[in-house]
């Protein structure tokens, strides 16, 4: 049979929901630590611990949510219904997160926990249902990369908007005021992106939906797939390497570079070049294979990012170059791992559907962010770092920001190179798509 090829309009319509999803993610893991620790006065260790515990609880629910979505889909419930529920929860959670009341530390900690819980639940419902829908759009090996690249590219646009808007909306006010205004702009963007995907995106290819009424005991069935275990391990290590700088970038820019006025510029450069580099990685994966190209992207990110450790006050231009080069390397992380996951799902023969796999995928992604915030922030606090004081140990902040992620990324590249994935999936996909 001829593999289904999606047109530009169909890809764009499917990818539209990625924009508000990405807009919600960046402020939570980049701006929330600084907002609650620096501007609202919660201890840095407390904020790190709350983020860690909230992420653990959130991540633990994702496999269950994936199983539940699959089970309801098998019973006839459309995945689109979960996206609608996600829109309501995500909108309410973001509004609460960036409109905290002026209350004591204990009550503010409780507020932060509750706002994070609602936000994370909304994001989980939406992302798992949405990613599962994307995995069902085409059975073709290379077409999946086009789908995930389109979703990733629109997601990068969402990240760019999220990076720039809080600064633009501050207009001489506080950082907290900019975030409050951002949350109000986020609501119509969320409704528009979800509406385009729900009403205009292509439906899954015939026979693509593989959901069955599996028992709850099958929730861990994806872990029986060795290709998935390898892919998940690589994704975990590489993701932690990316999450640590994302958690610490505002502190690094403020206290090492002394260029807080360029926060939005640095974030914008990084994600813009990530989007620009993505087509290069997609084309390279067709020639050399997804596994090899993803490993090359990891190596490129280390070469580009390690130089950040040597930077100091006033090195804004040099850091902008680091952001641009490491952003290009980041494009491989956006396009290739989800495409490899879709390949793994397509060749599963246990009867597990997309939701079960993406539940564990989301679990892993959130644990990466949880470990980054829950370990890096408390460790910096214990060794004496205090945000905004511009006092030693700035070298420790630089090492945590730049060197530790590079070491983890090298470990992920070695792990990926040893992993027995991609080649056999490519061969089987090519055979399955033949007439």
Image (cartoon, rainbow, N blue to C red):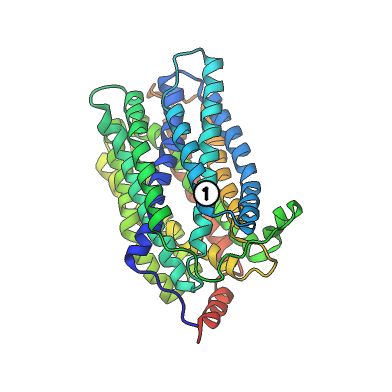
List the residue tagged with mark 1: 81
Residue at x 64% of width, y 59% of height: 74
Q: Nearer the viewer, residue 170 or 230?
A: 170
Q: Furthest residue to the bottom?
A: 435
Residue at x 50% of width, y 83% of height: 1
Q: In the shown orientation, is residue 130 left or right of residue 303?
A: right
Q: Could you tell me residue 169's position as x and y percent?
A: 27, 30
Quadrant housing residue 146: bottom left
Q: Could you tell me residue 194's position as x and y percent?
A: 41, 48
Residue at x 58% of width, y 69% of height: 346
Q: Nearer the viewer, residue 127 or 312?
A: 127
Confirm whether residue 152 shows in the render: no
Q: Furthest residue to the front?
A: 76
Q: Is residue 40 above or below residue 51?
A: above
**Few, some or many C-alpha atoms within 10 Å of disc 1 (few <14, some 14-19, many ≥20)?**
some
- Does dot 1 land on a helix, a strand or a loop? helix
Q: Is residue 367 above or below residue 39?
A: below
Residue at x 50% of width, y 52% of height: 80
Q: Could you tell me residue 84's position as x and y percent?
A: 48, 45
Number of marks drawn: 1
Q: Could you tell me residue 397's position as x and y percent?
A: 45, 34
Q: Nearer the viewer, residue 70 or 278?
A: 70
Quadrant housing residue 320: top left
Confirm whether residue 193 shows in the render: yes
């Amino acid at each position: 049979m001829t593999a289904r090829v999606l047109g530009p309009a169909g890809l764009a319509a499917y990818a539209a929901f990625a924009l508000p999803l990405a807009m919600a993610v960046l402020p939570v893991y980049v701006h929330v630590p600084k907002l609650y620790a620096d501007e609202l006065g919660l201890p840095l260790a407390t904020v790190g611990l709350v983020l860690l515990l909230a992420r653990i609880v959130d991540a633990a629910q994702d496999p269950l949510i994936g199983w539940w979505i699959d089970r309801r889909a098998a019973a006839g419930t459309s995945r689109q219904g979960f996206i609608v529920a996600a829109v309501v929860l995500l909108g309410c959670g973001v509004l609460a997160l960036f409109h905290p009341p002026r209350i004591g530390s204990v009550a503010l900690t409780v507020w932060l926990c509750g706002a994070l819980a609602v936000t994370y639940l909304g994001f989980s419902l939406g992302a798992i249902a949405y990613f599962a829908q994307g995995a069902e759009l085409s059975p073709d090996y290379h077409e999946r990369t086009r789908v995930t690249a389109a979703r990733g590219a629109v997601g990068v646009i969402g990240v760019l908007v999220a990076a720039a808007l809080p600064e633009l909306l501050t207009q001489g006010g506080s950082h907290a005021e900019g975030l409050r205004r951002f949350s109000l702009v986020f609501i119509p963007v969320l409704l528009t992106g979800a509406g385009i995907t729900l009403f205009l995106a292509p439906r899954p290819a015939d026979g693509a939906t593989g959901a069955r009424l599996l028992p709850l005991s099958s929730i861990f069935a994806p872990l029986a797939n060795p290709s998935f275990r390898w892919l998940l391990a690589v994704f975990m290590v590489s993701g932690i390497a990316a999450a640590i700088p994302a958690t610490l970038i505002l502190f690094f820019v403020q206290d090492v570079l002394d260029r807080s006025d360029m926060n939005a510029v640095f974030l914008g450069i990084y994600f813009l070049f990530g989007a620009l580099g993505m087509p290069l990685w997609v084309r390279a994966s067709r020639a050399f294979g997804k596994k090899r190209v993803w490993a090359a992207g990891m190596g490129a990110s280390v070469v580009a990012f390690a130089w950040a450790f040597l930077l100091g006050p006033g090195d804004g231009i040099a850091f902008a170059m680091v952001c641009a080069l490491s952003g290009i390397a980041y494009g491989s992380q956006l396009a290739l791992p989800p495409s490899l996951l879709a390949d793994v799902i397509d060749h599963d023969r246990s009867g597990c559907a997309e939701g079960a796999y993406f539940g564990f995928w989301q679990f892993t992604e959130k644990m990466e962010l949880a470990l980054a915030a829950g370990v890096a922030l408390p460790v910096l606090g214990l060794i004496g770092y205090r945000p905004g004081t511009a006092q030693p140990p700035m070298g420790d902040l630089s090492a945590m920001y730049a060197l530790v992620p590079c070491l983890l990324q090298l470990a992920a590249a070695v792990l990926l190179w040893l992993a027995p994935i991609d080649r056999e999936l490519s061969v089987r996909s090519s055979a399955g798509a033949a007439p």
